[in-house]
Amino acid sequence: MAARFKLGSYETVRDDPLGRSHVGFFPRMTEEEAWDAGRGVWRMSAGKAAREKFALIVGEGVVRAVGQVTGFAVHGDRIELQGHVLGEGHPVRDAYLGKPDPVGTGSQNPVGYCDLPEEKQFILSPCHCGCGLDTDRDFLPGHDVRAMQARVRQHFGGSPLKFIQWVDDQLAGPAPKEEGQEQ
């Protein structure tokens, strides 16, 4: 699934979380300018932001930039996408750049989502548990637990308690030095 962001009219802004002096669409903007204007900040769930691979930036009903999403940052109740503009020859970019907005919901909400046939080949990757199956997330449902259990068996003699104690020790960091001890 791809996220679509509709740009409003060009306007100057103050105190933008991304340090921009202006946001919105203006005629003759470059793809990079459209990406910069459209990558944030938006009201959307972090869960959805984490699953998106591509973003379409729309101005005046036309796709002005297509970007690959590599991460996101949270700014209060809003999300900033991180990534880059796709280059010429990328199938998702070539299919949508300069074309009408593919999210035809009629909604006034500037954030929308759509399945793009061209993105399917980029969405699936091997499950990180090592099962050999493909997924659109880090793990297939339940496979994260399977991977953790395998590591508990391999490194902690099958004892979840030993694993939890080890995690707690790692998070606690080095023990504070008592007064009079060498640093």
Image: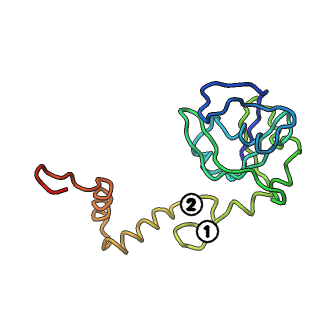
Query: Residue 27: image x %, image y %?
Result: 87, 33
Q: Is residue 63 left or right of residue 55?
A: right
Q: Is residue 21 left or right of residue 46?
A: right
Query: Residue 172: image x %, image y %?
Result: 29, 53
Query: Residue 49: image x %, image y %?
Result: 62, 45
Task: Count the marks.
Answer: 2
Which residue extends farthest right?
A: 99
Q: Quadrant of residue 10?
A: top right
Q: Which residue is mark 2?
A: 138
**Number of other residues with Cα within 10 Å of mark 1, as a class: few under 14, some 14 to 19, many 20 or more:** some
- The label number, if any, that marks residue 162 in the structure image: none
- Give the residue type at disc 2: Asp
Kind of element beneath mark 1: strand
Tell me the residue at 73%/33% (across/down). 110
Query: Residue 132: image x %, image y %?
Result: 59, 73
Tell me the residue at 66%/37% (across/down). 40
Question: Is 76 in front, or is 152?
Answer: 76
Q: Which residue is mark 1?
A: 126
Disc 1 or 2, which lies upstream in sequence? 1
**Number of other residues with Cα within 10 Å of mark 2, as a class: few under 14, some 14 to 19, many 20 or more:** some
- In this picture, is 113 found above or below 12? below
Tell me the residue at 88%/41% (across/down). 100
Which residue extends farthest left?
A: 180
Tell me the residue at 80%/41% (across/down). 103
Question: Is 22 in front, or is 50?
Answer: 22
Kind of element beneath mark 2: loop
Give the quadrant of the C terminus: bottom left
